[in-house]
C-alpha cells in the first residue's frame, strides 16, 4: 500500500520523476549564482543566495530519494535497465554526499562577496555528476520504459524471469509440454515472465483462467508481463496497444501485428505450456 | 529543416530535450514562490528577494529554450491520439505560466536590489503561476507515463533485437515514423 503510494499509483504518475526537478534546478541555480558572484563581486548576497539554493536542492534531493529507492526496487532483476538504474542511484548518492560537504564548507563564509575556489570546485564536480545521473535517469524512462504505464498494472511487477527448458520435458510428437509450477499460484491479474529455450512469454491469470502469450508487444516491444488486463485483453503499458489473450489478435492499436500465443494445459495435475515445433523453428 | 527538427527532438543526445529543459522552470518558479514566502521572515536581509528574482529569470530563460523543443515533440503526435489534446492543454497552460512570470519579473525589476520582502502582487503572481505550472507539468508527465510519447522511440532497434531473440512475432522492419 505504502509502496503503491510512493510509486505514485493513486496519482497515476510516478513520484520520483516529479520531485527530481527540484534538486536538478536548484543545484544548477546555485552553481550559476557562484559564477555570477565571480563575475560581479560587487552584487551583494550572491554567496548567501547560492547557499540557500543549494540547501533547498539537497533537501529536495533527499525527498526524491525515497520514491527513487522504491522505483529501483521495483525493476525486474534481469531488466536491461537495472544496471543503468544502479549507476543512476550510485551517482545520486555521490552527488548528495558532495553537496553535503559543500554546504558545510560554505556555512561559515556566507558573507563573502565572491565564492571561494574550494566550494566552487565541489559544485563543479557535483554538477558534472548530477548531469550524468540525470541523463541516465532520463534514459531509464525514454529508452527502458521504466515506470511508464506502471500505474495501470494493479498487481506486483514480476521480479524475475523464470527460466525453463524443453530439454527434460516430455515430447509428444510436434508439441512439448513444459510444466510451469509457479503458474498455479497466480491470482487474478498476476503475471509470470517465463523464458523457455529463449522463447520469452507472459503467463497471466485472467478471470480465473491461465493464458500464455509472447512477452514483447508487437509495436515497440513493451513488456506485456507488466501490462494491464481489460476483460480478456492485455494492454501494453507503454503505448496502450491491446491484444486478445486467447488468440493474440490486436484489438486496439498502435500495434498492427498479432501476438504469438501458447496453450496452457494441466497434465497429471501439473500446469504447463505447450511449445510446438513451429514455435521452436521461429526462435 | 530536418536536421534542426532532429536536433530539437534530442536525437543527437539519445534523450528527448524538452523534458530535460523543462526541469529548470519546473524547479525555479515554485522555488520563487518558496523564496517569496521566506522573504516575509527576516532571513539574510534581502537575500530571499534576490534569490526569487534570479530564480524567475533562470526559469524564464530555460522556458524559452524548452518551448521550441516541446512544440516539435507535440507536432510529432498524431492528431487523433488523446496525447495530442493533452499536449495542447499542456502547451496553452505553459504559455500562460510563462507570461505570468514575465509580468512577475517586470514588477520586481525596480525593487529587488533593495527590498527586504516581496510585495503582495508579485507574491500572488508567483502563487497563481506555480499552481497552473503544477497542473501543466502533471499533464506533461501524463503524456509520457500514460501515453508513452517519446518512450522507446530512440531505443526501438535495441528492443526489436531483444524481442527477436525472445521469439516474438515482430512488425515489418520498416515502421512508419510515429
Image (tube, coloured by chain):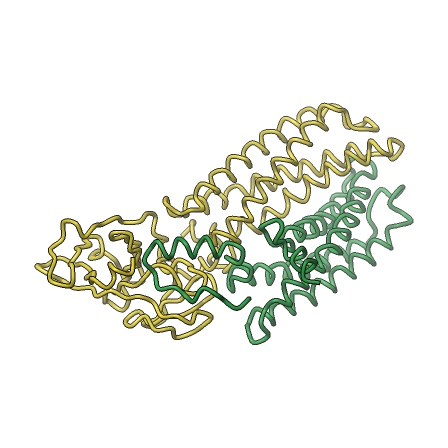
Chain colours: A yellow, B green
Determine whether, in the image, residue B15 is placed left or right of residue A273: right
Q: Is residue B178 visible?
A: no
Indicate whether A48 appears above or below B100.
Answer: above
**Closest to the observer: A247 or A137?**
A247
**Residue A124 percent coordinates (x, y):** 69, 32
Q: Is residue B96 visible?
A: yes
**Residue B117 percent coordinates (x, y):** 82, 45
Choose top left, top right, bottom left or bottom right for residue A264. Answer: bottom left
Determine whether, in the image, residue A28 is placed left or right of residue A80: right
**Closest to the observer: A61 or A254?**
A254
- Say which quadrant the C terminus of chain A sits in: bottom left
Determine whether, in the image, residue A232 is placed left or right of residue A94: left
For the image shown, how many numbered marks are present on the structure? 0
Furthest toward the left, the residue is A268
**Residue A75 percent coordinates (x, y):** 41, 47
Q: Residue at x 87, y 55 (%)?
A: B107
**Residue A116 percent coordinates (x, y):** 77, 24
Amino acid at each position: 500500500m505504502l509502496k503503491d503510494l510512493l510509486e505514485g499509483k493513486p496519482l497515476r504518475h510516478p513520484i520520483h520523476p516529479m520531485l527530481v526537478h527540484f534538486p536538478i534546478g536548484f543545484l544548477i541555480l546555485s552553481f550559476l549564482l557562484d559564477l555570477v558572484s565571480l563575475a560581479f563581486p560587487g552584487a551583494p548576497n550572491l554567496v548567501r543566495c547560492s547557499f540557500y539554493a543549494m540547501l533547498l536542492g539537497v533537501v529536495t534531493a533527499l525527498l526524491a530519494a525515497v520514491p527513487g529507492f522504491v522505483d529501483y526496487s521495483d525493476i525486474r532483476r534481469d531488466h536491461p535497465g537495472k544496471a543503468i538504474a544502479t549507476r543512476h542511484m550510485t551517482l545520486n548518492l555521490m552527488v548528495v554526499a558532495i553537496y553535503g560537504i559543500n554546504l558545510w564548507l560554505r556555512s561559515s563564509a556566507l558573507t563573502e562577496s565572491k565564492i571561494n575556489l574550494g566550494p566552487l570546485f565541489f559544485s563543479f564536480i557535483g554538477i558534472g555528476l548530477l548531469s550524468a545521473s540525470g541523463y541516465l535517469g532520463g534514459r531509464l524512462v525514454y529508452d527502458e520504459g521504466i515506470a511508464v504505464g506502471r500505474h495501470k498494472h494493479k498487481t506486483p511487477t514480476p521480479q524475475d524471469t523464470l527460466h525453463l527448458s524443453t530439454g527434460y520435458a516430455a515430447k509428444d510428437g510436434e508439441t512439448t509440454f513444459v510444466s510451469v509450477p509457479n503458474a498455479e499460484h497466480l491470482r487474478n491479474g498476476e503475471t509470470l515472465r517465463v523464458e523457455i529455450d529463449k522463447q520469452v512469454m507472459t503467463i497471466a491469470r485472467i478471470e480465473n483462467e491461465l493464458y500464455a502469450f509472447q512477452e514483447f508487444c508487437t509495436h515497440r516491444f513493451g513488456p506485456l508481463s507488466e501490462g494491464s488486463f481489460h476483460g480478456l485483453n492485455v494492454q501494453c503499458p507503454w503505448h496502450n496497444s491491446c491484444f486478445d489473450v486467447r488468440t493474440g489478435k490486436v484489438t486496439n492499436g498502435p500495434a498492427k501485428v498479432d501476438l504469438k500465443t501458447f496453450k496452457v494445459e494441466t497434465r497429471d495435475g501439473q500446469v504447463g505450456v505447450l511449445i510446438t515445433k513451429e514455435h521452436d523453428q521461429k526462435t | 529543416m530536418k536536421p534542426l527538427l532532429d536536433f530539437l527532438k534530442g536525437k543527437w543526445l539519445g534523450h528527448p530535450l524538452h523534458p530535460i529543459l523543462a526541469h529548470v522552470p519546473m524547479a525555479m518558479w515554485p522555488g520563487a514562490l518558496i523564496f517569496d514566502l521566506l522573504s516575509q521572515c527576516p532571513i539574510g536581509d534581502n537575500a530571499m528577494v534576490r534569490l526569487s528574482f534570479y530564480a524567475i529569470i533562470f526559469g524564464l530563460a530555460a522556458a524559452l529554450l524548452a518551448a521550441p523543443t516541446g512544440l516539435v515533440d507535440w507536432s510529432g503526435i498524431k492528431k487523433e491520439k488523446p496525447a495530442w489534446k493533452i499536449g495542447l492543454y499542456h502547451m496553452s497552460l505553459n504559455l500562460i505560466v510563462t507570461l505570468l512570470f514575465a509580468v512577475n519579473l517586470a514588477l520586481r525589476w525596480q525593487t529587488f536590489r533593495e527590498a527586504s520582502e516581496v510585495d503582495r502582487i508579485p507574491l500572488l503572481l508567483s502563487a497563481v503561476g506555480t499552481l497552473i505550472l503544477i497542473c501543466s507539468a502533471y499533464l506533461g508527465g501524463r503524456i509520457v507515463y500514460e501515453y508513452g510519447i517519446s518512450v522507446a522511440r530512440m531505443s526501438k532497434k535495441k528492443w526489436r533485437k531483444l524481442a527477436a531473440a525472445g521469439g516474438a512475432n515482430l512488425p515489418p522492419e520498416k515502421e512508419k515514423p510515429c
